[in-house]
Image (cartoon, rainbow, N blue to C red):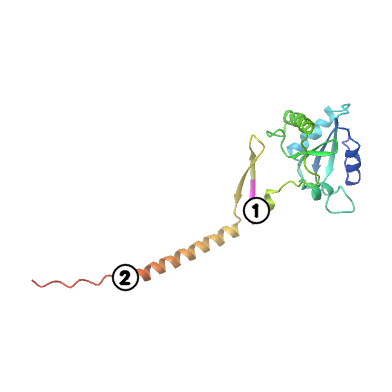
Amino acid sequence: MIIPVMTDESIDTHLKSSTAEQVNVLSVRLKEPGFVPSAANKTIENEFLRSRGNTKISIFIYFLDGADPHCATSLLKSRHGIKPGMGVVFVASRLIFADRIFDGHGADPASFRRELQNCRRRYAEGFRYPKDFKFSDPEEQVPNELVNFSRRTAWGGQIVQIESSGEQQTSRFLDAKTEMMSTIQTLVRLNSSHQLKPTPSLKT
């Protein structure tokens, strides 16, 4: 069974027509051949078959690089900073969740189902992101570094290891070496200028 594709042309109309009991889930992908689906993508799309007949949940694929054929930047990317591999959840027309892990734990089916329950609860409690809310991108926060994303913490945070590029490491090494040589030369000059002259021997 083919999963329907959500486009920029139809997303706002669809969300506005959704009721407070309806959850809309987007599996965010790229059309480019080299794109590797995340675990979140696979879990959401596998859930599509399981949720057939459930009118309270709708699952779509959203291509970040093809949602709008007339614009290079998709609506969700420009509006919320959505990234490839994310799962995005709307309750009615409001954005409630966007991440690559679910329930602060993982991308497995059980975590995904718990996340859907969490989204419904948060919506009922009045939580929702502002319409112009943008998710931050750690890679944009450290543009001069190479960011190596490793595992996620139990609460949904991301353990990030920042590694310097080869050029940066070489530059820092040379700077440190130059500073060290300058310091040594200064110490040598100071030592030379403050050397104690030998004390003349006393005649007895």
Q: Which residue is mark 1?
A: 142
Horizontal side of 108 relative to 1 (left or right) equals left
Q: Let me know if residue 165 is in the magenta part.
A: no
Q: Which residues are magenta?
A: 141-148
What residue do we see at 77% from left, 32% from top?
125
Instruction: Say which of 104 and 1 sits in front.
Output: 104
Q: Which residue lies most toward the front here?
A: 126
Mark found first going from the N terminus, 2 or 1: 1
Q: Quadrant of the C terminus?
A: bottom left
What residue do we see at 60% from left, 49% from top?
162
Q: Quadrant of the N terminus?
A: top right
What residue do we see at 63% from left, 37% from top?
153
Amino acid, disc 2: His
Horizontal side of 129 relative to 165 (left or right) equals right
Amino acid, disc 1: Val
- Image coordinates of residue 147 in percent, x first then y, are 64, 49
Name the disc covering residue 71, or none. Answer: none
Name the disc covering residue 194, or none. Answer: 2
- Image coordinates of residue 117 in percent, x first then y, are 77, 29
- Image coordinates of residue 120 in percent, x first then y, are 79, 31
| Contact? badges 2 and 1 (CB < 8 Å) | no
Q: Which residue lies most toward the left here?
A: 204
Kind of element beneath mark 1 = loop
Horizontal side of 152 relative to 95 (left or right) equals left
